[in-house]
Image (tube, grey):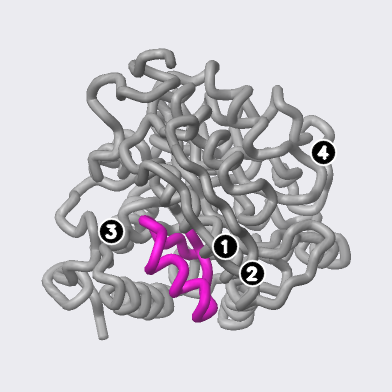
Amino acid sequence: MVLTKGNRLSNNPIIRSQDLDAAEVSWFAPICNDDFRYMGIFDDELKSTFEHASKAVIEAESNGFRNVLCPSSYQVGQDTVAFGAALAPMIEKIQLLLAIRCGEVHPPMLARAISTLDHILKGRLTINVISSDLPGETLESYARYRRSAEVLEILHQAFNREEINFEGEFYKISLETTEPVRSYQQGGPLWYFGGYSPPAVDLCARYCDVYLMWPETKERLKDLMIKMSDKGAEYKRKLDFGLRVHVIVRETENEAREAADLLMSRLDEAVGKNIRERAQDVSALGVARQTEMRGLSNNEGYAEPHLFTGIGRARSGCGAALVGSPEQILEKLQEYQDMGIRSFILSGYPNREECEIFGKLVMPHLKTCALAEVQNRVPKEEPDTPLAGGKRK
């Protein structure tokens, strides 16, 4: 079944921003030891220092990106929330998409941290919900998602009710007031989530706003979108869709393919395997699907035109790149938009260089938006909250 404008998916009322002709185009902050000139070659100039990663975000803002994903990982790098707090005064327009691992922080204090940063950013905070194992922990999949659901329910109460009253398997919390954690945005930040197992899909459908997918063939993406739309309908909720993917764009297709080959040219397969397996999500279903994509690719590493899966040989998680000329990349992004995808989280190697190239060759031709603004989360005037316009008590 082909899902283009006018068919089932584009007309599906579960898709929140189906009539939007713009997309939220985001970049990626290299805060978790994931920046390379040659995949698998650890260049000290590309270490995940604050100086390097903050310049990458500022570069993204200067090139017109609307949001930037700050990932979470227990490997050499930086804490996501600490990085976001330090960076916030240095940026003016771009949003931050902070990856938060459910269970790491007591939920009311997590709500307070989110609210504080949301105020510092004047409503430009979004959250990527992560439900993988905590560092040093192994928890059965369904239990992890039950814990994540409890965290999100508590946060939902914190940002939408006058008090928190929750009793579950992992948390028992009773607080008479939510005033200390009132967020700048109405109802709290948007929640972005990526997951493929049945409990992951259910969690997203119940609590989250944007369903994130890693790069796969269009047919496989369409299947995921239909399943999530149907699950959202069970909860009478509307969802937007996002795609997290790398990009390699050059003036011509040949130049882009040569750049992709050069990026992979010095990879030692044993080093690549070690990089893949040290991630916390190494056993996740989504990672397995990325491995499948490499198996479906041709001898040159392409699973379909312009979708290069070689990146996944030295990276866990998002393991493919869009490769081509500006016209080809724009056409590919338009195809995704026609399917119903309204958020793109892009990255490249080296991070700042590819950001500048994409910003020059592609961004001027894209109509962009911020989904939080589209969905009326960000107040037009300073809100009446304790950390903004509210009276001191």
Q: CA distance from mark 2 to mark 1?
A: 6 Å
Q: CA distance from mark 3 to mark 2?
A: 32 Å
Q: Residues at badges 2 and 1 in contact (C-beta under 8 Å)?
A: yes
Q: Which residue ends up furthest to the right in the rendered image? A: 270
* Mark 2: secondary structure: helix
The residue under label 2 is 144
Residue 284 in picture, x, y percent from top left: 65, 73
- In x, y percent, where is residue 260? 61, 55
Give the secondary structure at mark 4: loop
Q: Mark 3 or mark 2: which comes first in sequence?
A: 2
The amino acid beneath tag 2 is Arg
Mark seen at residue 43: 4
Dot 1: element: helix
Residue type, label 1: Ser
* Residue 184 visible in the shown view: yes
Residue type indicated by callout 3: Gln
Q: Measuring from the top left, give residue 272's x and y in whole percent.
A: 80, 62
Mark sitting earlier along the chain (4/2): 4
